[in-house]
Structures are given as C-alpha cells and as structure tokens.
Image: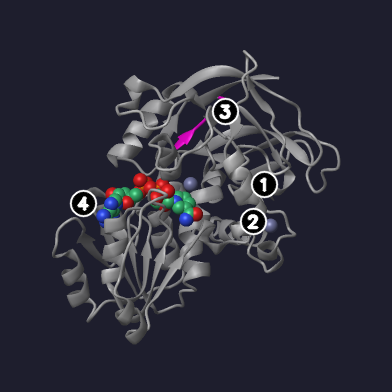
Amino acid sequence: MRMKAAVLQAQGLPRPYAETRPMSIEEVELAPPGPGEVLIEIAAAGLCHSDLSTIENQRPRPLPIIIGHEGAGIVRALGAGVTGLKEGDHVVALFVTSCGECRYCVRGRPNICAASFDTRAKGTLMSGARRLKRLNGEVVNHNSGLSLFAQFAVVMRDSLVKIDKDIPLEDAALFGCAVMTGAGAVINTARLRPGEEVAVVGLGGVGMNALLAAVAAGASRIIAVDTSQAKLDLAREWGATDCFLAGNADCAAAVREATAGGLDTVIETAGTIPAFELAHAITARGGSTISAGLPNVAAKFSYLHAALVSEERSIRGSYMGSCVPNRDIPLLLGLYRRGKLPVQKLKSGFVSLDEINEGFDRLAEGTVLRQILRPNG
Ligand SMILES: NC(=O)c1ccc[n+]([C@@H]2O[C@H](COP(=O)([O-])OP(=O)(O)OC[C@H]3O[C@@H](n4cnc5c(N)ncnc54)[C@H](O)[C@@H]3O)[C@@H](O)[C@H]2O)c1
Ligand SMILES: [Zn+2]
Ligand SMILES: [Zn+2]
C-alpha cells in the first residue's frame, strides 16, 4: 500500500529544520505484514529527544530511514501466525522488540534484548525483513523496528502491547517511550520507596515523567534541576519541592547545601555530560546516580575512582526505564487512570506530518515538552 511518511534523508543538517528539512514528506510503499508481523495505523506519535539526536547525527543510522519510536495506534491487519491481537485492537508500540530467548530476555530484562540491538544497526525488523520502499524502489530503513512518523507501520507482534480502548491514543502514545523511561527509572531502576528523597536533572518529556512518578511513589522531597526556568516553574506546579537552575557553577553546591551533602538517589534525564556530572555531584556518599539521558554515542565522563570505592557510590544506566513492557505498561496505565500519573499534562500541542521539521526546531529550542504527531489528521 501507499502511505505518507516523513523520510529522514540526511543527518547533521543545521537548524532551522524548517528550512533545511532533514525529513522529506513523501508517499512511500509499505509491504503487507509477513509472518509474525502486524500492520498498524498510527494514531499518535510523540516527538522525543532521541529522534532529535538522530536528526543531529548524535547516533548514526542507515539512511534513508523513517524515525519515530513513541506511539500508539490501531491494528489493521495481521501476518501469519500472529496471536493475541485482532483487527481493531488498540496498541502501544515499543522501541525495543524482545526476542524472548536471549540471555537478557530469559532473565526478565527484555529492555536490553540482544537481538533488538543487533537489528537496530541494520535498519530492519527483528525478523530481518524490510517492508519500506520509496516509490523509485529505493529501500527505506526501519528505526527501532517501528518507524512511526508515517500513517501506517508494519512491526513485529512483539513490538506491541495491547491496551484498553477507553484510553485516548494520544495519551497512550507517551507510554511507549517518555512514560516507561521516566517513570520506570524511578519505580524500577531506583526502586524509590515512600518517604525517600530524589532529584531529577533534566525536565523534558522523560524527566517530567520521572517527577510525576516520584510524586506517585510518595517521595518526601523532589529536587528539580534544569537549565530552563520555565521548566522549573512547571515542575514546581507538578510536585517538585525544591527547584535549582543548572548552568552556573554554584548549582551543585547549592543543592548539596540544601540537602546536607546530596541525595541518595539522583536521576539524570537530560542526555548531556554536564547534566550527568551535575547529577553525580549532587549524589550523596553511598548514593546512586541513575542516568537515563542519551548523549552522543562517543561521549565519555570520568570520575574519581578512589571516591567511587571509599564513598560506595553507584552509577547505573536505565534503558526504557528497566521496564518489562507487558507488566509495566498496564501498571503505569493503571496509575494514569486513577489520576496518579497525569501524563496528559505533558502534551505541548499537535503537529501534522507536514509540520514535523518545525516541531523538531521547537524541541531543540527547549520550548516544549511532548508534541504529538497525528499523521492521519
Ligand atoms: N534511556 C532511555 O531509554 C531513553 C528513552 C528516551 C529518551 N532518552 C533520552 O533522554 C533524554 C531526554 O529526552 P527528552 O525527550 O525528555 O528531552 P527534552 O529535550 O524534552 O528534555 C531535556 C531537558 O534537559 C534539560 N537540560 C539540558 N541540559 C541540561 C543540564 N546541563 N542540566 C540540567 N538540565 C539540562 C533541557 O532544558 C530539557 O528540559 C535524551 O537524551 C533522550 O535521548 C533516553
Ligand atoms: Zn524516546
Ligand atoms: Zn532477547
């Protein structure tokens, strides 16, 4: 079938994207779903900073490619052998497809499935299949097995979690990345307990979800840190107890002073080395710095080895919020349904496919949280 899509044709173009247009909006050919695959109509897809990082070439990808990895939609057709889904079902898409068989999957860590990482670099679905072509026959790569900046997508069955139909799809879309990543970092990776204190460094779509989850988890004190005063003001409205403006040398000292030497748990959700270093600097002796931000693939940080040992510090990565999606998406949707995880507040407006380059200008400027693409109008 033919559909309209945003095809990323070059990485690293300068801004404004409204002028350089890294994504061209065009008709492409989408093949029907093969064995184990599902055709979905995309109802809503979030514009995440990880997509921006791909546009910026922080993460090289095979080109041309259709990006977009946070979304929700409606099942329109099933390939051979697909079980547990039927036409018309509502689904959330997952940016890690899990194989269920590798050493990570069998240990309950599908978020770091080995097979998924291998196929991401190749730009195929996990089965190795390709379903996307330009009208001139040129192959178009899949992104994270999803490619959601399009009207439809063919994805593996294991890239989908079925959800109840009463949940608005534009809210459900956020659960695929921002909610799992931010809330999961607090609930799964940090295992924050009621009454504990936490700091969140970087209050974008992911960080605000960490903040909302910290409120839901009953944190007694939530320190919000960002370079944007507007984001801090919003964070205070949504439950932060203390706010600190990053970007000046005194920030870490001010947080340490306000917390008698730092916090036991600090979550970094900005994706830059300065933000990570700040997060580490405000972590207390014996505490954990949990990083969910994704900087340039080659970026490195350094720390004092002796202090790591003598102060018993830990530094942990958190990918997709350490989530087991089939367990955690229903759990997080349950919190949302009860009003305990009001992620709908994160929506900063809607864009059409034709406006997607402009949307990434706004994300890069830091003036929005989650913009939602509605590729089918
Ligand atoms: N671990 C995962 O599975 C996963 C999933 C999705 C996104 N990410 C990554 O998480 C990061 C955040 O994504 P997002 O969509 O929320 O981005 P965003 O652009 O919406 O938010 C980033 C926030 O960080 C703030 N910031 C920038 N530099 C800072 C600094 N030095 N100190 C404090 N705050 C600073 C910005 O002002 C902004 O509010 C990105 O790096 C993204 O690639 C990781
Ligand atoms: Zn994302
Ligand atoms: Zn696996």
Q: Please tell me how crowded label 2 is: few (under 14), some (14-19), or many (20+) other residues with Cα within 10 Å.
A: some
Q: Which mark is residue 117?
A: none
The spot of residue 342 in percent (x, y) is 46, 54
Seen from the viewer's position, the closer of residues 308 and 89 is 308
C-alpha gap between disc 2 and disc 1: 15 Å
Q: Earlier in the sequence, mark 1 or mark 3?
A: 3
- Name the amino acid type tagged 4: Gln
- Kind of residue indicated by mark 1: Ser
Query: Could you say which quadrant of the image residue 157 lies in?
Result: top right
Under circle 4, the secondary element is: helix
Left or right: 333 with respect to 58?
Answer: right
Which mark is first along the chain, 1 or 2?
2
Reply yes or no: does residue 201 show up in magenta. Answer: no
> Left or right of 353: which side holds 223?
left
In this view, the residue in front, 357 or 76, is: 357
According to the image, label 1 marks what residue? 159
Residue 15 sits in quarter? top left
Which residue matches tag 4?
229
- Which label's residue is closer to the chain start, 1 or 4? 1
Q: CA distance from mark 4 to mark 3?
A: 34 Å
Q: Position of residue 332 (x, y in %)?
A: 56, 59
